[in-house]
Amino acid sequence: MDPGLHKGASLPDPAAHLQDMAAVRPGLGRVHPGSSILFLCDMQEKFRHVAYFPQIVSVAARMLKVARLLGVPAVLTEQYPQGLGPTVPELGAEGLRPQPKTCFSMVPAVRQELDARPQLRSVLLCGIETQACILNTTLDLLDQGLQVHVVVDACSSRSQVDRLVALTRMRQSGAFLSTSEGLILQLVGDATHPQFKEIQKIIKEPAPDSGLLGLFQGQNPLFR
């Protein structure tokens, strides 16, 4: 018998112990529909020259479809829309009101959305450009204590060097780098989910290649 226990002493509650462990391990990066939000950043007409733009928009559109099926809220921004044009129709963002901005972060423009959701824990981030608005949005969100999941196959830059270094910088700062399918399956959680069949149709075909393989090869010192 444990000498620290005496007659009448209660044994520790295993469930409470697990909750305590989870509370002190915030870095696991789990995502749940009820505490997540999807950020869609600046996928506009004048950015069509960005590398892998069609693929990035296609993957972001997947994320938006899944978010709608699972009840995950989504917010959309446009950088200086008077000059850079509206959001491209391929994103399928009808019904979302774009928030105009000039800041190289989404956070000031969507502050009201964030403040209205005290249960929010995770932000799933898609868009362009990686070294500009994606990076600065990530830093602002991390600074507020939120977990950021950068959807790497839904983010790009004109320069792939900028893209690579920005992904590395965000990882160094504490963001999670995830693929769209990895996040989608985390959100749905179980093949018995009532929306799984619809989501399965969305991810049946692999996400389009957006040039990531070369960035993540083993010889790349930035990801060691």
Image (tube, helix red, strand yellow):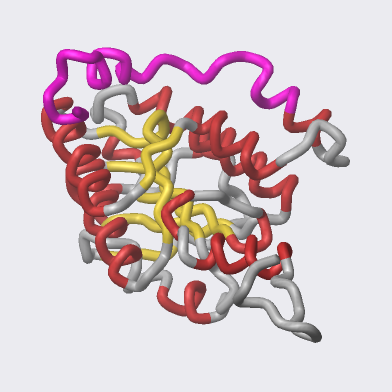
- 206 shown above or below 156: above
On the rendered structure, is 135 left or right of 180? left
Percent x, y of residue 130: 25, 41
Percent x, y of residue 151: 42, 38
Q: Quadrant of residue 77?
A: bottom left
Q: Give the residue at x 29% y 52%.
A: 174
Q: Nearer the viewer, residue 31 or 60?
A: 31
- 190 shown above or below 49: below
Magenta residues span 200-224
Percent x, y of residue 198: 79, 31
Q: Give the residue at x 46% y 59%.
A: 25
Q: Nearer the viewer, residue 125 or 222?
A: 222
Q: Quadrant of residue 65?
A: top right
Task: From the image, give the main secondary structure of the stretch colored magenta.
Answer: loop
Q: Nearer the viewer, residue 55 or 137?
A: 137
* Residue that lies at the very extreme toward the bottom in this rendered image: 8
Q: Quadrant of the N terminus?
A: bottom right
Percent x, y of residue 64: 59, 43
On the rendered structure, is 159 left or right of 87? left
Q: Quadrant of the C terminus?
A: top left
